[in-house]
Amino acid sequence: MKQFHKGKLAWVLILSVAPGVLSADSIKFDFRDSKKVNNVVFLMDAPLESINGTATGVSGTVSFDPAKPAATTGKIVLATSSLHVDNPLMKKHMLDEGWMHVSKFPTIEFVAVKMTNVKTSGTTIIATIAGKLTVKGVTKKVSVPVRLTYLKGMLIKRNRVPGDLLVLRCDFTIKRSDYGINAGNNEEKVSDEIELKLRVAGAAPY
Amino acid sequence: MGWSKSTETRTEIDEVTGLEYPVTVSKYVFGVELLGAALGVSGGLFGLSFAFCKPARPGNRSGAEISMI
């Protein structure tokens, strides 16, 4: 009976410690950026008009293990209210109910689930990241190419704090009709395809 | 030439990460819709000027014109 209890206790200990051991080498990078360097550029090229804008309200965290980049997971969040175009009337329309409806859908989220086709070259990793993109309350599975650059010990040069940086570059295209963004309307001026360029860096202080 | 802008966005590069990022500054740039409006108003005023022009009267004619008559 005593032996049974000892064995049971050992298993409980192993199971409780195992997740910590397994994720011990994974570094958590925070993508909040008060300097507003982290950004998303969006481009829409319609027959009558070409629109380009930016957004800098990026936050989120990514877990990255330099030894196992394929195990990268995380979530990047964009504040919809930070979407910006230089024309004030166009910006008002974009944030209004008819288009992005910011008051009801305050965030755009990308949850990274799995990384495949991982190719490492020095500090740079090129891969395909599969995840779920939520825009205007609609969640869809997407698979997008990504380039990660792991800058070990470089945080001190940027934020005067010792730590690592993870730079993430990702270019992909979505359709506004897929996410219910004024679908089917004004396509001669606002194209259905939206080209997105994500340029973000996460910090992991020691 | 595009639409009017109340801001201007230029791109800069972060020295440490090499990331390109937008810097937005307040600056009013006149757009094509204001040019169109200005042309429309000036055209309207030009047309309106014909409605108020005075007809030429004999008393106002120059001496040379009167002698020819």
Image (cartoon, helix red, strand yellow):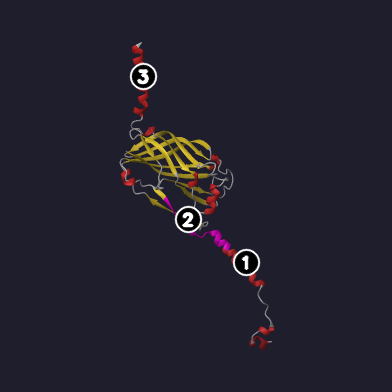
* Amino acid residing under circle 1: Gly
Give the letter of the chain under mark 1. Answer: B
Q: Which quarter shows the N terminus of chain A?
A: top left
Q: Which sits in the foreground, A103 or A84? A: A103
Residue A163 pos. (x, y %)? 32, 40
Residue A151 pos. (x, y %)? 33, 41
Residue labelled with disc 2? B7
Q: Is residue A184 above or below residue B24?
A: above
Which residue occupies 48% across, 43% down? Answer: A79
Neighbours of disc 2 within 10 Å: few (<14), some (14-19), many (20+): some
Residue A193 pos. (x, y %)? 52, 44
Q: Is residue A7 visible?
A: yes
In 3D space, how far apart are the residues under numbered discs 1 and 3 (Cα atoms)?
89 Å
Q: Which residues are magenta?
A: B22-37
Give the letter of the chain under mark 2. Answer: B
Apparent side of residue A28 relative to residue A85 in the rendered image (left or right): left
Residue labelled with disc 1? B44
Q: Which sits in the foreground, A187 or A24? A: A24
Neighbours of disc 3 within 10 Å: few (<14), some (14-19), many (20+): few
Which residue occupies 49% across, 41% down? Answer: A107
